[in-house]
Image (cartoon, rainbow, N blue to C red):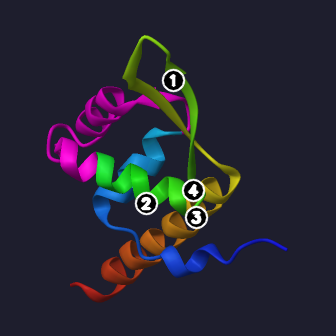
Amino acid sequence: MKKDITKYSPLTEATYYILLSLQTPLHGYGIIKKVEDMTNGRLVLAAGTLYGAISKLISYNLIELVSEDINNKKKKEYLLTESGFDLLKIELRRLKEMVKNSIDEVK
């Protein structure tokens, strides 16, 4: 039986972008740069925010550690799990609904 991931929704903006960036393996600095690039510099993740989120996302089985440099323990790569991808799709539907409702209601 699949774990109910809807309990992790709604995501914070930072967590959403971390998940979005991990559709391919990335290390911490790569995540920070990708999020910054995706948001045109509007969202810059602090290291504490990133690694706190990574720790939680791993414990929730939404991302996984896929490689670790044996010579440099700080160089770890993470990747979205199937559950993480499912949650990302749930959040995308929620955000699309919010935008649609806003367009319909804001005149």
Residue identifier under label 1: 68
Q: Secondary structure at mark 2?
A: helix
Residue identifier under label 3: 87
Residue identifier under label 4: 62
Task: Give the residue at x 24% y 43%.
Answer: 39
Alpha carbon distance from label 2 to label 1: 18 Å
CA neighbours of label 2 inside 10 A, class few (<14), some (14 to 19), many (20+): few
**Which comes sooner in the sequence, label 3 or label 4?**
4
Quarter of the rendering occupied by the N terminus? bottom right
Q: Amino acid at mark 1?
A: Glu
Q: In the rendering, at what x and y percent does residue 35 appear?
A: 30, 39
Task: Give the residue at x 23% y 84%.
Answer: 106
Q: Amino acid at mark 4?
A: Leu
Task: Give the residue at x 35% y 55%.
Answer: 53
| Residue 6 position (above or below residue 78) | below
Alpha carbon distance from label 3 to label 2: 14 Å
Q: Amino acid at mark 3?
A: Leu
**Which comes sooner in the sequence, label 2 or label 1?**
2
The residue most toward the right is 1
Residue identifier under label 2: 56
**Which comes sooner in the sequence, label 3 or label 1?**
1
Q: Which residue occupies the foreground of this view, 70 or 105?
A: 70
**Which comes sooner in the sequence, label 3 or label 2?**
2
Q: Are marks 3 and 4 in contact (CB under 8 Å)?
A: yes
Q: Which is more foreground, mark 3 or mark 2?
A: 2
Q: Which is more foreground, mark 1 or mark 4?
A: 1
Specify start and end residues of the magenta stretch as a single range. Answer: 23-50
Please say whether residue 45 is visible from this viewpoint. no
Q: Amino acid at mark 2?
A: Lys
| Residue 55 position (above or below residue 66) | below
